[in-house]
Amino acid sequence: MVNPIIKLENLNFYYGVVKALSNITMNFNRNCVTAIIGPSGCGKSTLLRLLNRMNDLIDNTRVEGKVEIDGKDIYSNNVDPVEVRKKVGMVFQKPNPFPKSIYKNIAFGPKINRLARGSKLDDLVEESLKAAALWDEVKDILHHSAMELSGGQQQRLCIARALAMKPEILLMDEPTSALDPISTARIEDLIEDLKEKYSIIIVTHNMQQAARISDFTAFLYLGQLIEYDKTEKIFTNPSNKKTEDYITGRFG
């Protein structure tokens, strides 16, 4: 796989004494969409949160192995997790806008991190909302509460909020599982557009979604990476019987 942006090497992860991930070695490619699939409890979200050190916020967890982004091990002692999270944005399963105006939702991160102020901040808010395909719907109500938006709009707002921090990588943890089919289709179209500028990693339970939007797919089972390849190969001619059984609905 050419030009990886993230490299994982012999990655193990523990919640207390429970080993949640075992010996995961894989690369994530730049400007691609990579889907992580597998049954509930297989370690998908744990793996995703390792990529921006969100698991640091959970007590009694431990990481072994390497997670390199642009050639730098993000778990080195001299690396600030806050800097990692600026580079690696995250969108969660349920839309979680701040109880503030639409404008303030987008401006909050850049403002406290001093990325922009004044008219430059206005421009950044507009640019981020346009990138998330939301600007035309909210440009006249920027100072209304984000809580007034529909679920699909709120999720696009959360994507815009992540993009406002100028990340290189966007992590998405089942970003459409709480949405209706029309909102889901809009987010999927948006992901397709965003990969021109960002490297996107998405956890999804939805096989059809993984097949539709991703370039590469990783199948996890019981904390192990069973198979990782081009999406077309995974879904039409998987190398591993377990992958085939999962994709065809025999378990999971």
Image (cartoon, helix red, strand yellow):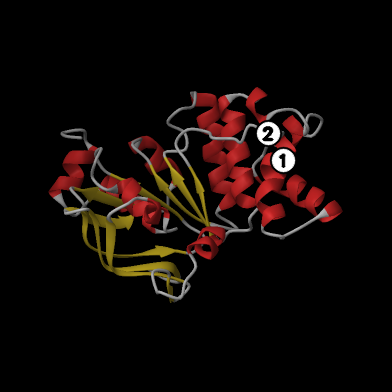
Q: Residues within 10 Å of mark 1 (few under 14, many from 20)?
A: some
Q: Quadrant of residue 207?
A: top left
225 vs 154, left or right, is left
Q: Amino acid at mark 1?
A: Lys
Q: Find residue 172 and report its horizontal and vertical position in percent.
A: 46, 45
Q: Are marks 1 and 2 in contact (CB under 8 Å)?
A: yes
Q: How many marks?
A: 2
Q: Find residue 233 and report its horizontal and vertical position in percent.
A: 30, 52
Local SS, label 2: loop
From this viewpoint, which residue is outermost toward the right?
119
Who is closer to the viewer here, 164 or 233?
164
Local SS, label 1: helix
Looking at the rendering, in which quadrant would you find the C terminus?
top left
Res. 216 visible in picture? no
Looking at the rendering, in which quadrant would you find the N terminus?
bottom left
Q: Amino acid at mark 2?
A: Lys
Q: Which mark is residue 104?
A: 1
Q: Residues within 10 Å of mark 2 (few under 14, many from 20)?
A: some
Q: Residue at x 42, y 58 (%)?
A: 53
| Residue at which label 2 appears | 100
Q: Find residue 81 and report its horizontal and vertical position in percent.
A: 48, 63
Who is closer to the viewer here, 24 or 81?
81
173 vs 225, left or right, is right
Q: Residue at x 47, y 33 (%)?
A: 94
Residue at mark 1 to residue at mark 2: CA–CA distance? 6 Å
Q: Quadrant of residue 112?
A: bottom right
Q: Which mark is residue 44?
A: none
